[in-house]
Amino acid sequence: MKELQKKAREVLNNNWKDRFSIPCANLYPFQWFWDSGLIAIGFAHFDMQKAEAEINTLLDAQWGNGFIPHIIFHTESDSYFPGPDFHCSNLHPEASKKYKSTGMTQPPVTGFVLENLYRISSDKKATLKFIETVIDKVYFNHEYFYKNRDPQDEGLIYIYHNWESGTDNSPIWDDIWKTMNSPEYTFERRDTTHVDASERPSKREYDHYLYIIEIAKENNYSDEKIAELSPFLVQDPLFNSVLIKSNESLIALYKLMGNNEDKIAQLQKWQTKSIKSFNDKLFDEELGAYIHYDLRNEKPIRYISSSSFSPWFANIPNKERAASMVKVMLDKFGGEHQYLCASFDPTSERFSPKKYWRGPVWINLNWILYNGLKQYGYNDIAERVKQDTISIIEKNGFYEYFDSRKEIHEHGNAGYGGNNFSWSAALLIDLLNS
Ligand code: GLC
């Protein structure tokens, strides 16, 4: 295990670019929001300075309205499409003047990342001091979501693009693409020059991705207009679980710091409302798990993915629901020939074991599930998730995602996408030390 941990540290150090980390070379050459947060958890185990710098750089790119972008384009690079010239996020009047970025966001991990830095730190006093310098920016980011991304005042935040979900190519979005009449764009993709095209989205899917951005641009990235006009508007259980978990962490940290009664009270209000709506609206009794809701077309999207189990992490389900989710996960995702946890229901016809987010196992979701299962006392299953995670990395290396079918790992490489991938390394380090 020492050897594996050493390699993981090397991956992180190699992807470190002075003030921030890239997810991996070539395929993802900039700073990504949720990658950055999860990477900081890995660094916290051996280089707290880098962990703090990572968060500082991310928060430095925050907009005047509290928004944090999903990609921060620190450098010029033509190895990625669509780049800053396509996104034109400076159309928004409050966009950062200092950094080029996209005009969409990603799951807001920063709150619970800060709490994890504190947990891991061997100098709690110093880490709390650091947290005190950044925590209000994270609070401001949560305020942005509740003020601008919740048009029906439910305590549930919408995402307006599949890239905001973090689970970019999930089959969850397939039915939404059918409702859209996107133009055919001419463009040169870069992802398929780095990774096998069969593992990536189709050209037609890319047309939809670009079309949603075009609509946002036509409206200068106004949240109000996007809520009114975007053909993609979804309440995502993973995104909302991450926000709710981060609320919980902010409350805990503000209490540790003392003197923040107003913010604590506001966070608790958001929590109560969000958790109630989450349970009322996103749990599907028949499927026995949480699902996405298509807010634009006002209908539930009735598919199970690894996101369906993320509410454990944020203490959202009651005991009965948590138990029903465990059963669903083990029945559908947990057969003896499967590694936990596939990103999409392996019993569905939409399951595709090599295509990104349409089936493979992802280390960040496994980390979320591991911690969630432990919170509910399912230590044996949590341990299985942990051991599966260690095994697939040991066998293949620090890939971006992995085949969930055990037999594939017996016949050579079963890791896909980018290699030497930062969050796979970072979260492995955390799992090995937990
Ligand atoms: C892919 C993933 C996304 C991640 C990004 C950078 O687009 O779907 O979640 O943030 O890569 O690693």
Image (spheres, rainbow, N blue to C red):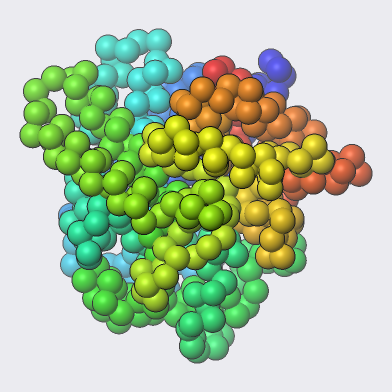
The reply to whether residue 122 is in sight is yes
Residue projecting furthest to the right: 411
| Residue located 38% across and 39% down the image | 316
Q: Is residue 187 left or right of residue 266?
A: right
Image vertical order of residue 126 relative to residue 244, above or below: above
Q: Name the image quarter holding residue 228.
A: bottom left
| Residue located 65% across and 59% down the image | 358
Q: Is residue 147 left or right of residue 295?
A: left
Residue 312 lies, in percent from the top left, at: 46, 36
Residue 74 lies, in percent from the top left, at: 41, 52
> How many numbered marks appear?
0
* Between 331 and 225, the one nearer to me in the picture: 331
The C terminus lies in which quarter of the figure?
Answer: top right
Q: Name the image quarter holding residue 216.
A: bottom left
Image vertical order of residue 434 relative to residue 22, above or below: above
Residue 262 lies, in percent from the top left, at: 8, 34
| Residue located 18% across and 67% down the image | 93
| Residue located 60% across and 72% down the image | 189
Image vertical order of residue 365 relative to residue 380, above or below: below
The N terminus lies in which quarter of the figure?
Answer: top right
The reply to whether residue 33 is in sight is no
Q: Is residue 309 left or right of residue 199?
A: left
Residue 77 lies, in percent from the top left, at: 51, 60
